[in-house]
Amino acid sequence: MDDVAHLLPAVRADLLPRLGRYVESAAAYEAAVALTGTAVERAFPQRRRAELAGA
């Protein structure tokens, strides 16, 4: 289960902006990054988090 633990906060982070909840989305991306094991897997939530900051 540890190898997929980052997926729930990543999905949540992807859905929250649709509700206008950008701060919560950024926090969920940070949680996904913290739970991700490899640099390759961390790249996506880090990039999405950066996109939220620029929006």
Image: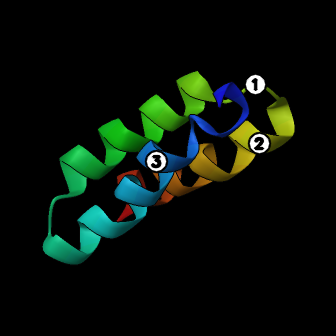
Which residue is drawn at the image coordinates 65% and 31% (left, top)?
1
> In the image, is residue 1 above or below residue 13?
above
CA separation, marks 1 and 3? 14 Å
Q: What residue type is labelled 2?
A: Glu
Q: Quadrant of the C terminus?
A: bottom left
Rate crowding at label 3 as few (under 14), some (14 to 19) or many (20 or more) other CA atoms within 10 Å: few
Q: Do the residues labelled 2 and 1 touch (CB within 8 Å)?
A: yes
For mark 2, what is the residue? Answer: 41
> In the image, is residue 20 above or below residue 13?
below
Q: In the current view of this chain or complex, which residue is farthest to the front?
A: 1
Q: For this rendering, which residue is in front, 35 or 23?
A: 35
Residue 33 horizontal/vertical position (percent): 58, 32
Q: What residue type is labelled 1?
A: Gly
Residue 29 horizontal/vertical position (percent): 45, 43
Q: What residue type is labelled 3?
A: Leu
> In the image, is residue 37 above or below residue 54?
above
Under tag 2, what secondary structure?
helix
For mark 3, what is the residue? Answer: 8
Rate crowding at label 1 as few (under 14), some (14 to 19) or many (20 or more) other CA atoms within 10 Å: some
Q: Residue 28 carries which label?
A: none
Rate crowding at label 2 as few (under 14), some (14 to 19) or many (20 or more) other CA atoms within 10 Å: some
Q: Upstream in the sequence, badge 3 or badge 2?
A: 3
Which residue is drawn at the image coordinates 14% and 69% (left, top)?
20
Which residue is drawn at the image coordinates 52% and 36% (left, top)?
32
Q: Is residue 13 left or right of residue 47?
A: left
Quadrant of the rendered image containing residue 18: bottom left
